[in-house]
């Protein structure tokens, strides 16, 4: 059965969908002409038509039934065609009991298979089409989508370049993760490595980096092994004075004093005594050429060490002043500080050696510091080399990085989540596949059973019983001037006058409507082909009593109520009925049910279609909304969404109905009690009812705005008040009645 309809953007229906839910076996719609009833019946007849692209029709358990719709399209399609013949209606005969039993058995088998399919569909999609295993799978996919999206949120800023193209769609991001998970074989880098590469490859205009210049400390290190550092630089030991100098161990003191001795003209600078030539000769021989050479070696070492140290320190200062982004400059600064400290210490020791060359000294080695410095620079240059290689191969390196970023997200951020997702999805996929297999097998088996049923039906169908049935009804209700007859080909009907002439194009509107309905009525019990007679179906009656007088209207109502009883007793193929009408009497006849109390029964639903400027609206009611035509008119007045187009005529009809019953009340005298614009409005309402409802102005409509509507409603109330029938007005308005504001007295 149909369980939901959504209708929008067609005919009188606006952009906002009118959604109709929870249909039952019998569904009654009341609405005036041009309110949108036929559009609704057309949607049910063919929801795939282009004009219904914004609409939707949902079947219970996603199992469509055969649909039969009686509306003006049906009449036009079957009775307003050039051909004089009408398709015959095939019904089952009763001559072969064995075949009838086979048909009944096939229908039972088809019903059981349909129930099996419906049950499987319910497990698959839920009773309302929004649950079951498919809903569980959708929830799982939605959950993993949200979880995966959190990775995007966490890494968007640092990996905006590598993730480009997947940052604006949760669905696309999830699909990319699942795709990369299957094929991505990249290595897993650290987040720091990935971020560094991303900054390089996706930064602004990446360029090659200049390597850090090599720092050579070989020259400085070579001074640490100079033999002069461990040599005691003293004079010649076989000289007379040598014994004394060695005994006193004051070679450096004597060497210093000799400079003053030479300047002082041979006079001792310490005792101011004149010395002998032998003393002068011994002193000169003690500080011989070897001593001078060693002293010069010490001086050279001091000078060279200072030069090499200064050059090395300046080189490092230059590197630190403009460091490469790949150089750990803070560590380099620390190592340089240590180097500077050792160099300063060594310079002091060398200065002491120069001052006292007879001393043996050792220099603090800078070897380990230089090893650390060259290591830092080497690491930086390795990184620079990688960077420059990436710049040279930018496109390929970007592709590699993109793959590595996705690999990191999958392996580090989502590994356990995706594993859990795999387990659950595999279980659901397996269950869904099994259910779909069951549905497919049962559907194929049902198709075969239906094919067998069609063959059985063809063997015992006939169009003759329908002719007899329709002619019997026509005759019993006095339609004697025409009847149905079998056409020459044996599969169609024709409508003939008593003299044998074709009567189709000479029927009155009432006659055409009645015979068309009888044709549709019998079609519901059969089929216009030799098969499909026993298929389950949904039936729609759209205003079937137009142009019928009261007697025939009663006949049609009775026939439809008979169909409703068959549905109620499950004694036919009809499973659901929709009735749409604008006729109050017909609506009351069809909906009459002595078992109904105040509210609608479970087997029925009630709806009212309203044409409210500018769009149609459909309202569901918990009770039968149509009591009498008089109550219906008052209901329109009470409705805040009343039509501005028809409100004047609604008010006029209420006045006509009510005051004609009273009689003897001169409403013209009442009109005289109004003044100005209110008097004009009162006259327009009262004088209309004097002419009766059959005059030309019965259907006079005049578009008015909201202010004018309020004016009509105010004068309408005042007519009841001035005629001393305000109590009736208040009763009919019910809870919607609002006392008008009191008029201010004029001083």
Image (cartoon, rainbow, N blue to C red):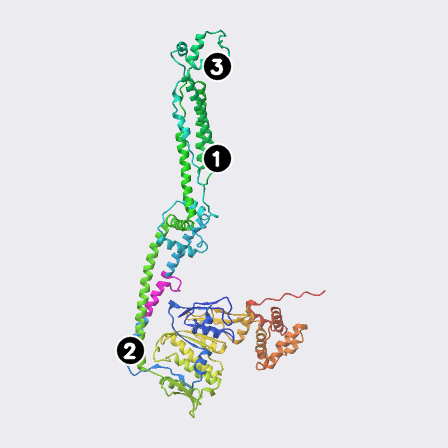
Q: Secondary structure at mark 3?
A: helix
Q: Which residue is mark 1?
A: 318
- Which numbered disc flags the more N-terminal residue, 1 or 2? 2
C-beta proximity under 8 Å, tags 2 and 3: no
C-beta proximity under 8 Å, tags 1 and 3: no
Q: Which residue is mark 2?
A: 101
- Judging depth in this view, the residue of 46 and 212 nearest the camera is 212
| Residue 128 lies in the magenta-colored region | yes
- Which numbered disc flags the more N-terminal residue, 1 or 3? 3
**Looking at the image, is 712 positioned above or below residue 277?**
below
Q: Secondary structure at mark 1?
A: helix
Residue 42 shows in this picture: yes
Percent from the top left, x then y, of residue 395?
42, 51
Span of residues in magenta: 112-133
Percent from the top left, x then y, of residue 522?
39, 81
Q: Secondary structure at mark 2?
A: helix
Q: Which mark is residue 259?
A: 3
Q: Residue at x 61, y 76 (%)?
A: 685
């Amino acid at each position: 059965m149909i369980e939901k309809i959504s209708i929008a953007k067609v005919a009188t229906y606006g952009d906002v969908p009118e959604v109709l839910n929870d249909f039952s076996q019998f569904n009654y719609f009341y609405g005036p002409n041009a309110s949108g009833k036929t559009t609704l019946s057309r949607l049910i007849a063919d929801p795939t038509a282009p004009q219904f692209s914004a609409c939707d029709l949902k079947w219970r358990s996603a199992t469509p039934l055969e649909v039969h719709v009686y509306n003006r399209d049906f009449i036009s399609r079957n009775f307003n065609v050039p051909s004089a013949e009408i398709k015959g209606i095939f019904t089952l005969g009763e001559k072969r009991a064995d075949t009838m039993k086979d048909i009944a058995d096939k229908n039972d088998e088809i019903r059981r298979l349909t129930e099996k399919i419906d049950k499987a569909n319910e497990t698959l999609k839920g009773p309302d089409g929004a649950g079951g295993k498919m809903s569980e799978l959708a929830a799982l996919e939605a959950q993993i989508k949200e979880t995966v999206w959190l990775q995007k949120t966490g890494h968007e800023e640092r990996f905006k370049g590598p993730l480009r193209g997947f940052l604006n769609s949760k669905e696309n991001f999830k699909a990319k993760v699942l795709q990369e998970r299957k094929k991505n074989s990249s290595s897993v880098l650290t987040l720091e490595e990935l971020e560094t590469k991303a900054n390089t490859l996706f930064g602004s205009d990446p360029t090659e980096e200049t390597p850090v210049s090599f720092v050579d400390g070989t020259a400085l290190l070579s001074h640490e092994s100079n033999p002069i550092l461990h040599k005691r630089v003293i004079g010649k030991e076989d000289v007379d004075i040598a014994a004394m100098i060695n005994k006193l161990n004051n070679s450096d003191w004597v060497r210093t004093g000799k400079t003053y001795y030479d300047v002082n003209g041979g006079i001792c600078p310490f005792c101011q005594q004149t010395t002998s030539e032998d003393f002068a000769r011994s002193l000169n021989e003690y500080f011989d050429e070897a001593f001078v050479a060693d002293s010069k070696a010490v001086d050279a070492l001091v000078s060279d060490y200072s030069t090499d140290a200064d050059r090395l320190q300046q080189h490092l200062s230059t590197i630190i002043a403009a460091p490469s982004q790949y150089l750990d400059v803070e560590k380099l600064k620390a190592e340089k500080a240590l180097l500077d400290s050792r160099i300063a210490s060594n310079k002091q020791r060398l200065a002491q050696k120069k001052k006292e060359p007879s001393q043996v000294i050792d220099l603090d080695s800078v070897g380990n510091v230089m090893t650390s410095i060259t290591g830092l620079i080497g690491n930086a240059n390795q990184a620079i080399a990688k960077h420059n290689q990436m710049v040279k191969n930018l496109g390929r390196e970007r592709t590699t990085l993109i793959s590595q970023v996705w690999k990191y997200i999958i392996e580090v951020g989502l590994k356990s989540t995706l594993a859990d997702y795999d387990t659950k999805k595999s279980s659901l996929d397996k269950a869904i596949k099994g259910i779909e297999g069951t549905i497919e097998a049962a559907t194929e088996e049902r198709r075969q059973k239906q094919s067998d049923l069609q063959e059985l039906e063809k063997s015992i169908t006939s169009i003759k019983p329908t002719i007899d049935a329709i002619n019997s009804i026509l005759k019993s209700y006095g339609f004697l001037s025409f009847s149905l007859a079998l056409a020459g080909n044996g599969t169609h009907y024709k409508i003939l006058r008593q003299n044998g002439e074709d009567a189709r194009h000479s029927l009155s509107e009432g006659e055409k409507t009645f015979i068309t309905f009888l044709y549709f009525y019998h079609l519901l019990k059969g089929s216009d082909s030799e098969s499909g007679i026993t298929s389950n179906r949904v039936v729609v009656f759209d205003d079937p009593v137009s142009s019928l007088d009261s007697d025939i209207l009663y006949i049609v109502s009775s026939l439809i109520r008979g169909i409703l009883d068959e549905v109620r007793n499950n004694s036919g193929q009809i499973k659901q009925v929709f009735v749409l009408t604008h006729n109050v009497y017909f609506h009351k006849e069809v909906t009459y049910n002595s078992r109904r109390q105040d509210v609608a029964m479970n087997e029925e639903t009630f709806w009212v279609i309203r044409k409210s400027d500018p769009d149609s609206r459909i309202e569901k009611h918990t009770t039968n909304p149509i009591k009498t035509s008089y109550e219906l008119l008052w209901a329109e007045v009470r409705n805040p969404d009343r039509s501005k187009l028809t409100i004047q005529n609604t008010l006029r009809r209420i006045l006509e109905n009510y005051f004609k019953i009273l009689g003897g009340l001169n409403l013209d005298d009442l009109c005289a009690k109004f003044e100005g614009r209110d008097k004009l409005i009162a006259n327009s309402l009262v004088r209309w009812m004097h002419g009766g409802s059959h005059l030309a102005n019965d259907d006079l409509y005049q578009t008015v705005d909201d202010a004018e509507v309020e004016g009509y409603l105010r004068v309408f109330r005042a007519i009841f008040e001035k005629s001393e029938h305000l109590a009736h007005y208040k009763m009919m308005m019910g809870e919607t009645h609002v006392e008008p504001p009191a008029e201010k007295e004029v001083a």
